[in-house]
Image (cartoon, rainbow, N blue to C red):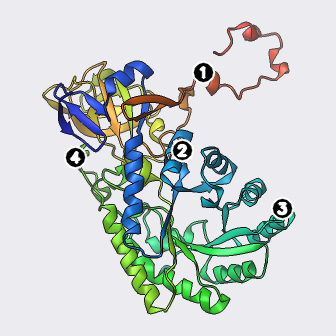
Amino acid sequence: MIVETHLDTHLSVDVGGELHVEQVPARELAERFGTPLHVISGSRLRQNYRRIRDAFASRWSAGVNVHFAIKSNPAIAVRRILTQEGAGGDCLGVPELHVSLVAGTPPERLVLNGNNKPDDAIELAVRCGARINVDDLDEVERVAAMARAAERVVTVGIRSKPDRGALEEQSSEMAALSIGAYAELSKWGLEPDDAVAAARAILARPELRLVGLHYHLGRHLSEPELFEDMAPGLAHLSQRLQREAGWAPGSVTLGGGFTQGRDPFFRNSGALAAWPQAADDFVAPIEDFAEAVCSELQRRFSERGLPLPVLGLEPGRYITASAGVTLTRVGTVKQGRARRWVMVDSPGTHLGLSRSPRDAHAIVVADGSAPDHEVVCDVVGPLCVVDVIAQQATLPAVGPGALLCVLDTGAYADGEASNANSIGRPAVILVEAGRADEIRRRETLGDVFGRDRVPPHLYVAGPGSDWHDAPAVP
């Protein structure tokens, strides 16, 4: 195969205009597995993990732990790849803990996060040996009681709210308020005074071993200065914990919040400008984020005479988003007076419930059918709502039957997908080393309605009384 253009490390277009994911033609994937179809590149997952790990590890002498946020892509095969690479895991509740264990992730490299943790999640973390980040003061005694019952010493951390400080000067691109205010209003984490109280309570219980501080900011800006502004508050809280509780954090976890490349949310910093193309790059390189974090944190810890802790990261989107694409087939094209609609078989809800028309995924023609001229159009799904996938995007003037590829859908597309209009979720395919394997099957009508139960009293005589004689849901 002669490759003409590389769109990414795992995406290329041959001389005939056909898209390949690694070495596999997208057209062949669509013909074999049907559309819509999520496709994950195994090699890109590995590249993304290694790049973020190395970016921080080369700049932080005390060591770095990368805990994959499985919420971004919960497929067991994806988790297995990252387990092979050495990634730990950021988990919420029993399902994410369980799946991470099934994928072979060592339990001591798993962390249970989240507010309002149910008893069964705490119990599983206690029994398997995962770390628990306490999110409220009452949680300390709940964890301690389960540790005593299991006759175990449980590793715990404290999740604290970021200090408003310099964050007050930064405006979040996620909300119409400052990042400091956003952090203070969020449901997660303890205020600094409560974090100190939690440390004292944990240290007083021999069945608990306090190891770290969790200080999550989230994804607000496409540039690294936010993490520089975070450093003074984190160092100050660490110093308070040392002075007032007699404990210096052995590890400090920054949470997630890192992203890359064509992140659909950061299109020109949120401005509704030209629709993105495959070659676009909105986000600073991860090495710039690592430099900002590591240099500023080391300076702040050194100023206060604090020992340098192990640095924890919990990336999800950074690892999975760019590794995934969605293949979708054009059904009809409709030209109105003010709009042109390209109608595809993938609902927008299968790209993630948290997205909006502002979140702009680059789209390319995947089957070599791209005409020479372009048009401005809306790419829309089949739902009985607006269902916009691309809004006023400049794309080749494709016709019915064309195969399109929506880029950067590896994060949250499948995990957040809904069954709106009773449409089943797509299959998920893993492509690596020249082979393609189904790692999540396509949902059937039976899957969609599998939870339904019809009470006997609804079978009484009258309209629809012969419903029970209808063919079974397949």
Disc 1 versus disc 3: nearer the observer? 3
Q: Around disc 2, counting alpha carbons within 10 Å, would you say few (fewer than 14), some (14 to 19), or many (20 or more)?
A: some
Q: Around disc 3, counting alpha carbons within 10 Å, would you say few (fewer than 14), some (14 to 19), or many (20 or more)?
A: some
Instruction: Please report contact status of discs 1 and 4: CB closer than 8 Å, yes or no.
Output: no
Q: Which mark is residue 174?
A: none
Residue to which mark 4 is pinned = 279
Q: Residue at x 70, y 78 (%)?
A: 198
Instruction: State the residue in front, 394 or 368.
Output: 368
Marks 3/4: CA–CA distance:
54 Å
Q: Image quarter for residue 39?
A: top left
Q: Quadrant of the N terminus?
A: top left
Marks 2/3: CA–CA distance:
29 Å
Disc 1 versus disc 4: nearer the observer? 4
Q: Position of residue 100 (x, y in %)?
A: 61, 48
Marks 4/2: CA–CA distance:
30 Å
Residue 227 in sight here: yes
Q: Give the mark nearer the N terminus: 3 vs 4.
A: 3
Residue to which mark 1 is pinned = 445
Q: Position of residue 220 (x, y in %)?
A: 41, 63
Residue to which mark 2 is pinned = 80
Which three-letter amino acid code belongs to the residue tagged 3?
Ala
Which three-letter amino acid code belongs to the residue tagged 2?
Arg
Instruction: State the residue in front, 85 or 166.
Output: 85
301 lies left or right of 129: left
Marks 1/3: CA–CA distance:
43 Å
Instruction: State the residue in front, 13 or 61.
Output: 61
Q: Image quarter for residue 453?
A: top right
Disc 3 versus disc 4: nearer the observer? 3
62 lies left or right of 422: left
Residue to which mark 3 is pinned = 150
Q: Give the mark nearer the N terminus: 1 vs 4.
A: 4
